[in-house]
Amino acid sequence: MDAEQEVQPAVDLMATLAETANNDSGILLSSINTVGDVSVNPLVVNQMSKRARKKMLRQEKQKALRKSKRPFTRNTNPGFSKDVFSETDYYFENGLRKVYPYYFAFGTYAKERWYGRTVQDVFQNEFRVDFPDDFRLSVEKGNLRVNGDIVGLDYKLTNGDLIEHHIHRHENPVLDTSIEIISDTPDLVVINKPASIPCHPCGKFRFNSIVFIMGKEFGYENLRNIYRLDRLTSGVLILGKTAKKTKELEDQVLHRHVYKEYVARVVGEFPEGEIEVDQPLGCISHKLTLWRVQSNGKPSRTTFQRLSYNGCSSVVKCIPHTGRTHQIRVHLQYLGYPIVNDPYYNSLAWGPERGKGGISDVSTEELCKRIMQEHNVGMWFEGENPLFHQAINTETDAGLNVLGKNITEDRDGTMHDEMHSAKSLEKLVNTSHSPDLTQSPEAKRQRLTVKAEETREKSQLENISVLVSESNVDKSTEEEKANKAARSGFDAARWVPDSGCRSCRLKYVDPKPSDLVMYLHALKYQGPDWNFCTSLPAWAQDDWESPKVEDST
């Protein structure tokens, strides 16, 4: 997000109702249009009787009272702890932080908009599924469960359903950028978040998220996100260490008692003076998290002011007064000055004007299709991964892999899976040094996880022995070697594939740094009695020059 997501405070509604409860003239249409994130028809409220308005006021007071007494969380240890951080490890290459793949179960409760829809419909339209056929096969193998029971693609979701999808998880790389700690107190830790790293686990990022990196490399457990920044956005990020402090700052954000200041580099010469945009915003694709200006959207307001212009692009100060998803980015697009390297809102997918004025030359369906094509996962891999065959061969006997499939290759290198006969499988199971094909998927996951852990421990012992053997060098050199050992490169022995995982078979192309950075930075966050800020990023300096044509897609 460009700033934190917020909801219209209930106190705004109560104040309006209190002022008008004894006024027969009714509520002004402009004074209320939302309760929380739910739209309210002003005409309906305006036509309510005096008695009905008093009743609504009582209900809102009771709701606010219940909320104030509600505990921050039912979980005594929210966030993530050491046992989770040890599931896998990082490795570093080509300026990127990467993660060894591991087994994982995605879990979420059904959202209200999913009720009555099939599992297949929800996954196709709400989530980015890289390989739809593989997802279908995964479901057929029993890897999708609802409330603990294996279900099919035609299962219809209802209220309270807990959905779990068991996968061999591969994460996308992020920039290998150091994290600057701005402030560290018993209640909070404040950092300058680097671009490319999401604040919390989402999509193809878990270990490559801020809370996991802070926990695994800096020792911070159970950190709580008070607000969020977009993955490609950098800047001030405040993380709570305690429930009390987290709730205190969340309330300040919720009631808009926090001043936020961002900087962005936009296309062209931004007009001088202060410019305010108050266009409402609506989500047009939950799958892509794509927003646009919509007349029936959520109220949003941003103030802009140009700081500099280098003859090609401008640095603009952005002050969001509300905190809608992608608010700054969409409002800049609306003005016709999108962020220089914004992959969503500075795209020709919107048409020749790139969405200026909230106008698109294509339908919403076509727009989403174009955006998806521009970010298609197929652009990020090239051919097959030779390590897959090498690793699988160590797990096989007589050409059999752990899932009982035979992997053969044509002359062109194309892979084929052939199910073995029952006789061949029986022979394999009876071989003492072969894997047990009668094991459950959970048992296989456990076996491979143990193997990965043994490999990791062996690598750590080797690193320690190297450091001990070189104990005659000075302390600074030892520290450098220790840091180097901790930030090791790729180790094929620690890469444990799953023979049924498509991602294991593919050789992925590393993204360029330009794909992982957007010129939007949270410069300052200030509350009633606190203030955190960073220095300007390099791209926001007056003498900065773009390395390439800035307004290209």
Image (cartoon, helix red, strand yellow):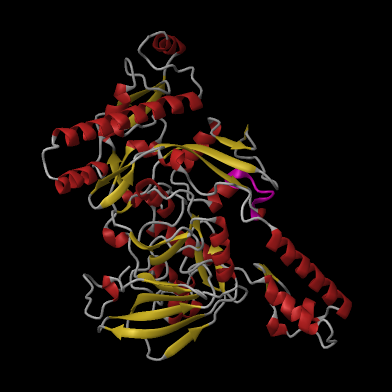
Mark yes or no: residue 413 visible: no
Q: Residue furthest bottom?
A: 273
Q: Quadrant of the C terminus?
A: bottom left
Give x and y (percent) for residue 35.
Answer: 69, 70
- The span picked out in magenta is 113-121
Q: Is residue 47 left or right of residue 132?
A: right
Residue 318 to residue 406: above or below: below
Q: At 54% from the left edge and 49% from the top edge, which residue is drawn? A: 78
In depth, the one of 370 and 258 nearer the eye is: 258
In depth, the one of 164 and 139 nearer the eye is: 164
Give x and y (percent) for residue 475.
Answer: 16, 46
Residue 334 to residue 503: above or below: below
Give x and y (percent) for residue 309.
Answer: 29, 84
In depth, the one of 192 and 121 nearer the eye is: 192
Is 101 included in the stretch rendered in magenta?
no
The mark tally for this picture is: 0
Q: At 38% from the left edge and 89% from the top edge, which residue is drawn? A: 271
Give x and y (percent) for residue 63.
Answer: 74, 64
Residue 538 to residue 207: above or below: below
Mark yes or no: residue 60 visible: yes
Q: Residue furthest left?
A: 472
Is 120 included in the stretch rendered in magenta?
yes
Q: At 28% from the left edge and 62% from the top edge, which residue is drawn? A: 514
In depth, the one of 219 and 88 nearer the eye is: 219
Q: Is residue 53 left or right of residue 276?
A: right
The answer to which image quadrant residue 372 occupies is bottom left
The answer to which image quadrant residue 451 occupies is top left
Q: At 49% from the left edge and 55% from the top edge, which residue is drawn? A: 241
Q: Is residue 476 left or right of residue 322?
A: left
